Each structure stands twice: as C-alpha cells, then as structure tokens.
Image: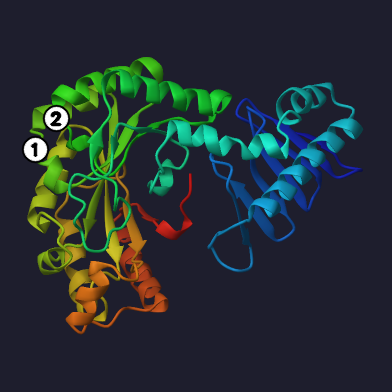
Amino acid sequence: MPVVNEAAERFWNLSPTASVLSPAPERVAAFDREGRLLTYARGDEFFKRSLASRLYARDRGEGRRWRELAAGEAAALFAETRELALTLAAVAGDAALAARVRDEIAPWTPARLAGEAARFASAYRPIAILPPDRYLSVVVQATEGCTWNRCTFCSFYQGRPFRVREGEELAAHVARVKELLGRDLVRRPSVFLADGNALALGQRRLRPLFALLARELPGRPVTSFVDVWSGERHDPADWEELARAGLEQVYVGMETGLDELLALVRKPGSAAECEGFVAAVKAAGVAVTPIVMVGLGGEGYREAHREATLASLGRMPLDRRDLIYLSPFVEEPGSAYAADRERLGLAAMDEAAIEAEVTALAAALRARGLRVGRYDIREFFY
C-alpha cells in the first residue's frame, strides 16, 4: 500500500511490480523489482531508462519528443536517483522501504546500470519498433529482419537480412532475455514476437516456438506484427491453431486503403486482400490492429488516401477487441520513398497537416464505435 508522510510531503509505494519513491512532490522516481531505475520526474522534466540503460528526457511543456542523454549526463542522473532512494530510506523510518532500497536499489551504482548495455546486447539485436501498447511486453526475437524489406518508406530492418532463430539458439535467446529482465518479468504481461513479421514462418516452425513460449513464459498472451503478403500463407485452420496456442493479437501494416498508393511505396497486397485477411484472422478469434500511415503520399494523395482508408476499414469486421493505430508519417531523408515523391512532384505534408488528418480520421472512426490510438514511431524505445 502507498505510504504518505504528509508533514514532510514524502511518499512511497512498494508494489509487487515496482518501487515508487518521492521525497518531495517535485521529485518522483520509479524502480523495477530488480532495483533498476525506470522513470524519474523532476519538476517539468521527465526521464526514462531503456533496458539497455540509455536514458531519455523530455520537458513536459515541449511536446512528446524524447532526447537521449549523453553518457555523463545519464551517470549523474543515475547517481541522483540512487541517492534519492538512500536518503528517503534513511529518514522515513519504514522497515519495508529500508529493506527494498537496501536489497534492490542501492546495489545499482551508475557504473553497474551503465553495464546493462552489454547484457542487453547479449540478449537482443537492436529492437527497431514495437506497437505502443506492447512497450511492456517481453520481446522474443524469434526472427530478425523482415521477409519483404522492400517498402520504400521503411528503414527499420535495412542491412539486417531475414533469419530465423529456432531450436537451441532460440531457447538460449529466451533464457538470456529472462535473465536480463529478472524480477521485472512480473511487470510484463505479454510476449511480443519480433522482428518485422515472425508470423510469416510456417506452422512447422511456429508450433515448437509457441510451445517454448508456453513453457518458459507461461500465462502470457502472444502478439506480433504480420503483413498481408506473408500472413495469407496461413489458412484459417492455422490461425485457429495459433489462437489455441496463445496468439491473442496481430498488428497489420495496412498503411492505406488506396491500392495506387500501396503500389507507389512497393507494399505487397491490396486493400481487398487486407480486408479478407483481417476477416480470416478475426474469424479464428484473434484480435487485429490495422496500422494506418497518415500523410503517406503527401498532399497529392491526401483526400484519396483518407477516403479509401476509411472505406476499407469500414469493410473490415472490427469490434471493440480491435484497435486502429494512426501513425503520423515520418519521411526518411534519402529514402527511396523521398526520391520517388520528388520525382513525381508530390508535395510532402507538413506536421500540422498530418496532425489535422490524424484528428479527422480519429473522429470519423470513433463515430463508428471503433477504438483508435496514436502510433508515433519517434517516441519509441525499449
């Protein structure tokens, strides 16, 4: 239960999943059950640590963008939050707080926290992207890269050939992930299969994968990205089998309901194929999250993209289990997409125009009773 000392304005909450400590209202630090810093609020500043012990900051009055702190800045902040915990434990007079700080938080010196980068690298290749509602998943990199990897707008998996982990290699990977997370596993209720489209694997490979997950990470539903092109290789019985094995939700890179625009960005499949695929997965009992890229195609495609996308989503059997993500398009300088857009004379949409489209699409979809979320790739780190 939370404990408050009102006279001193001190607060601490020792839950089964985290320790939240506040020696004063303007400073609040949260630590995982291993004792590692998670987040720190200091006045208008907010800091967050990744699993690789990179530290990111943003000012509450300056929008949603994160900046990464230099190594020296990060070390100083790690020291500050550790000292905060030690000081609060010393003056609070609470035995449970003193024990948790002594046993979990105090051992994590700035140097030891910085050393988590090496442990992360031993467990993972860089994790390029996750859906926002899966930032607290246990990520299992059953595959690396993307089977297609030719969309002109995407740079997530460039230079990373598609490969599969299986057998002893996969088991060792899962063991390293569990060791890295330690007691922080209690805070992570699901599994996300990475990288780009692990569900492109055939059932022969997926069956032992799901069996391993059920054994090593029990009780956690499984989610993953999938694209229409690779997902259509599974027949309805495959999706039903995967649902029984624990697959709960898939994230589909729809991007747009406009076939002309899909062809322009070299995205395989069509709007009709996407609609049929979503229907098949839904029929198997798996929730679906289509991801729409808002601003793709620039001003020249703005209205057609919006209208075709709304029409296509309207033909999908989506319900309240499902979620539609609207992702503001971020153009990669020097990408094939940027070159094609300039060659075709398509004007890029500025950030204000993209935000206006996000608002319009969200309003139209919510009016249909659908759930809508924002998916900004610039805000991601794991």
Query: Residue 169, which numbered label?
Result: none
For the question of whether residue 249 can be seen, the reply is yes
Residue 44 horizontal/vertical position (percent): 70, 61
Residue 360 horizontal/vertical position (percent): 33, 70
Graded by Cα atoms within 10 Å as few (under 14), some (14 to 19) or many (20 or more), the crowding at tag 1 reads: few
Residue at 9%, 38% (x, y): give it.
Answer: 233
Nearer the observer, 31 or 150: 150
In the displayed structure image, the side of residue 359 where residue 287 appears, left or right: left
In the displayed structure image, the side of residue 361 where residue 138 appears, left or right: right
Residue at disc 1, secondary structure: loop
Q: Write down the residue under mark 2.
A: 202
Q: Write down the residue under mark 1.
A: 233
Residue at disc 2, secondary structure: loop
Q: Amino acid at mark 1?
A: Arg
Which picture quadrant has residue 303?
Answer: bottom left
The residues tagged by marks 2 and 1 sit, at their Cα atoms, a distance apart of 8 Å
Nearer the observer, 136 or 78: 78
Instruction: Determine whether 18 is above or below 309 in the image.
Output: above
Instruction: Determine whether 287 is above or below 338 in the image.
Output: above
